Amino acid sequence: MKLLLILCYGLIFTLPLSMHAASLNGFNLDRLTVPAEEILSGGPGKDGIPAILQPRFIEGSKAKFLKSHDVILGLTMNGQSRAYPIKILNWHEIVNDHIDGRKFIISYCPLCGSGMAFLAKVGNQTLTFGVSGLLYNSDVLMYDHQTESLWSQIRGRAISGKAAGQSLTQYPLRLTRWTKWLSDHPDTLVLSERTGYFRNYSQDPYAGYSRSPRLFFPVANKAPSDYATKETVLGFKGKMGQIAFPLSELYKHNKEKFTYEFEGQQLTIHWDRQNQSALITDQSGNQLASTMLYWFAWYAFFPETEVFVAGEWNY
């Protein structure tokens, strides 16, 4: 009998492929927009990785559990800033949150290194999200509690169920180190370790994964070897296409700030070498939605992507 390797909290298990194909964690894959055989079980069942529905926060100055080099996802909305530590997101992957009544989610996939924020409203419906336990292109498939549709995180789009074909609005987010975020946002709140679940947040369930070229799950499009499999790139979705800014190219370019024209739009790229962080703003200085993630993951979803190469940029 053929076996499928799966990852559950950093441990490797196996499941018969026949069981995998039949169960799919209890989700009905009606109106599916991707090949069914490319949806795989990640190991845990539905909600086996528990999303945070009622997040608690503490003041940044009191977040003693964070070290200066810890990586966080930072969001600013309506003048309020919040930090979501990766060491917590590794265990929960989704945080349902709100600021001044505006609801949004923070989503992080450890297998793709992709952290993204989305507004939690589609049309007139406000949604809350959980972790399905399923993967597509090695990326977490979220599901909404209202329709139980499956949503591709990196695409930001529902791939099955009542919401199939609908898209979430991505909100600007920043991936950086804690000391940098706190310096820039001294009044920030921080997601507390008091999540309601017993987890050892000082332990990384994916320790060593980012340093290995090995993937635990297959992807539809294998990335060219121009860059390391898990090199971090800054990915940006335009109206028609996509572009990736590999951090190795930003190293070579060696400019903290520069402009790049993409689809007729002047993008300003901000590169923080010390904190391994990058973001994009428009001509008015407003941060645009982008995603820092592994090269293989970006290419798996967007094989036609443009790639920024130092020395070949445009102004």
Image: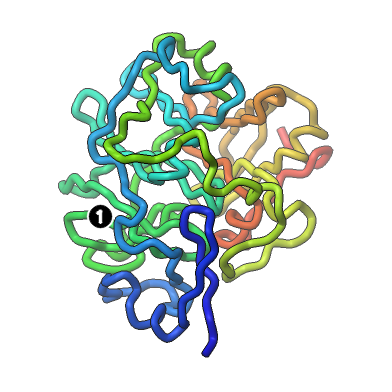
Q: Label 1, on which residue?
A: 144
> How packed is label 1: few (under 14 Cα within 10 Å), some, or many (20 or more)?
many
User: Residue drawn 52% across and 90% down?
Assistant: 1
Is residue 225 toward the left or the right of residue 64 in the image? right
Looking at the picture, how far across and down is residue 209, in whole percent?
63, 51
Where on the picture, by quarter, is residue 193? Answer: top left
Looking at the picture, how far across and down is residue 108, in whole percent?
45, 44
Q: Answer yes or no: is residue 208 visible.
A: yes
Looking at the picture, how far across and down is residue 154, in whole percent?
47, 53
> Judging from the image, what secondary structure is the residue with disc 1 in?
strand
Q: Answer yes or no: is residue 263 visible.
A: no
Looking at the picture, how far across and down is residue 97, in whole percent?
28, 34
Is residue 59 toward the left or the right of residue 70 in the image? left
Image height of 47 relative to 178, above or below: below
User: Residue drawn 59% across and 62% down?
Assistant: 300
Quadrant holding the C terminus: top right
Observer-nearest of 114 and 201: 201
Observer-nearest of 32 and 10: 10
User: Residue drawn 29% across and 65% down?
Assistant: 164
Observer-nearest of 29 and 254: 29
Image height of 140 relative to 103, above or below: below
Image height of 215 relative to 66, above or below: below
